[in-house]
Amino acid sequence: MIQLHKRCFVLLAVIIGSSFLSACSGPQSTSSVIAPQNIASPVSSAGESSDLIPTANDSEACLHQELDALRRTGTWENGGQLFTGMPGSNVHFDFPVTMNRQVQMYIDFFQNEHRKLFTSWLSKSKQYLPMMQKELKSAGLPLDLAYLAMIESGFNQRACSTAQATGLWQFMTETGRQYNLRIDSYVDERRDAEKSTKAAVAMLGNLYREFGDWNLAVAAYNAGPGKIGTGLKKYNATTFWDLAREQYLSLETIRYVPQLMAAIIIAKDPEKYGFTDIKYSSLPIYETLEVGPGMGFDGLALVTNSSKEDLQLLNQELIAGKTPVTDRKFLVKIPAGTRTVALNNLPRLRSVVSTDYKTHTIGRHETLASIGKKYDISQTVLLKANSTKNKRFLAGQRLRIPVNTVHYQLANDKVEAIAKSSNNRILHEVRSGETIAQIAGRYHVRPEMIIEWNDLKQSRKLQAGQQIALRLPETKEQTQTITASASHLQTSPALLPGDSNHHADSSDVLTAHKKNLPVQTAKEEFKWYQIANGDNLWTISQKFRTSPDQLKGWNNLKSDAIHPGDRLKIKEPNSIIAERRGNTVL
């Protein structure tokens, strides 16, 4: 799995190069925006959507041009009188907005050089302002502080800065965790609009209580309270403007306050400043759904009957493209009105995990270790996937890279009804050309029973991929292994919950023929392993010190496809048996 900060780093190299090649240098440029969709994406894990990859923080676009304009304003002025708005305007401010050369410079900059960018910020503002202002009001803070997210990220949940700050409010990792935001390889709550806003509101409240002045609090939000506190003591300053004149803070930091003031002035009265016909966008209204570990967006889209894109938009904190495999339960956001259908579909959701392969051409100076790190797999896995023990490779050689893929499907209602009615149940996926008679013979049940259980109107017509529900007898012979068509069996109670008090009716099934079933003896030390989300034949084989081919042989698997919740027959090597028993193998 690719870590977020590494992806930011690759992205930022593109940003720096692009900004100098863009039209930023023109005095009246309207093309200075670095559009995220045009930025080369960093290397990502297989199947990762571009909708989850961090984007450039466009508030940093044309920074060199912006700072040049700020330098030309000369000595920093005092804050001056509070600005109450344009004549004839009914706009009011609850943040202490003042007007001086620096603030006026930013108003002009947003109207001209940054016009296209500021227009895009305005268009996204209504997605977030109501929620942000609600949180600010609840905390007793100025509602105009919501525009801080505008200059921080341009109202972009996936924004990633040159300093690797992330999200709407541009939290650094350490600060985000300090304010109880979860940041790991699965979830980055800095990209969660509501949770990051609560954290930002808490932080701004703390900073105001520390400095007693909103300008200083906002400056400390950017530079850190230690930096601001030290500067106030060193220069015996009492206001932000006093400190700004001392050349103590960098231009990148002192620009922050006048930039915010200019953004507030324009955003609260855009037409007065020439911003007309803004096409405001909105986020989908959502409700929540509790799901299990490792649920991907494809599966969510299937159970909610909604688009994968909408779900990614609502759950941008899921940076791995799925719910954490470490969490037993996880609350996801789904489009409003889809919860009922999702609750009905969840018990029928089936995931199929298989191992595919991609090709990697070895570059100059690349090593097996660096390639393994790039794809988040061990060197041992790479060697075994390429059937070699030689760790030395030449530039230009090609390696097979194993990649887990997960596909989802919904079982039909009739199959579910049959599957839930017995503890001893299986689902059989029809192969091309299979008939009911062949399936009946394989599982030793009457063809008429299969037709009845599955409500098959045309008994001779089956479609490849169709799921057939079967009941098997609950006898002592259950301890024997039915291996026929094992690659298509789903036997997990976790996936197919049944009534533990129900027993298969003897009129529904025929007794399995013991002589046709392979019998496992205790001497062979076989055991059952239940497949978990994210498992594949390779990872399971490594746990039990065997090989994927051996697993396929034991379980009559014809392909690498396995299903979470299914069980695999495992023969433990003597070393593992001894470890479990506390013995030593000589």
Image (cartoon, rainbow, N blue to C red):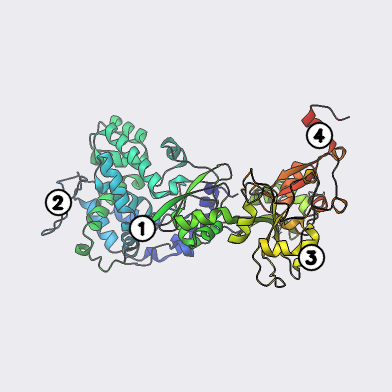
In the rendered structure, which disc, 1 or 2, sits on the residue that comes first in sequence? Answer: 1
Q: Residue 577 got which mark?
A: 4
Q: Nearer the viewer, residue 308 or 342?
A: 342
Residue sitting at 36 percent across and 35 percent down? 227
In the rendered structure, which disc, 4 or 1, sits on the residue that comes first in sequence? Answer: 1
- The residue where tag 1 is placed is 65
Q: Is residue 166 visible?
A: no
Q: Are marks 3 and 1 in contact (CB under 8 Å)?
A: no
- The residue where tag 3 is placed is 438
Indicate the secondary structure of the residue bearing disc 1. helix
* Kind of residue at disc 3: Gln
Residue 176 is situated, as x and y percent measured from the top left of the image, at 43, 40
Residue 137, quarter of picture = top left
In the rendered structure, which disc, 3 or 1, sits on the residue that comes first in sequence? Answer: 1
Q: Residues within 10 Å of mark 1 (few under 14, many from 20)?
A: some
In the rendered structure, which disc, 4 or 3, sits on the residue that comes first in sequence? Answer: 3
In the rendered structure, which disc, 4 or 2, sits on the residue that comes first in sequence? Answer: 2
Question: Which residue, as the protein is rendered here, is positioned at the far front?
Answer: 507
Q: Nearer the viewer, residue 171 or 32?
A: 171
- The residue where tag 2 is placed is 84
Residue 218 is situated, as x and y percent measured from the top left of the image, at 30, 42
Q: CA distance from mark 3 to mark 1?
A: 75 Å
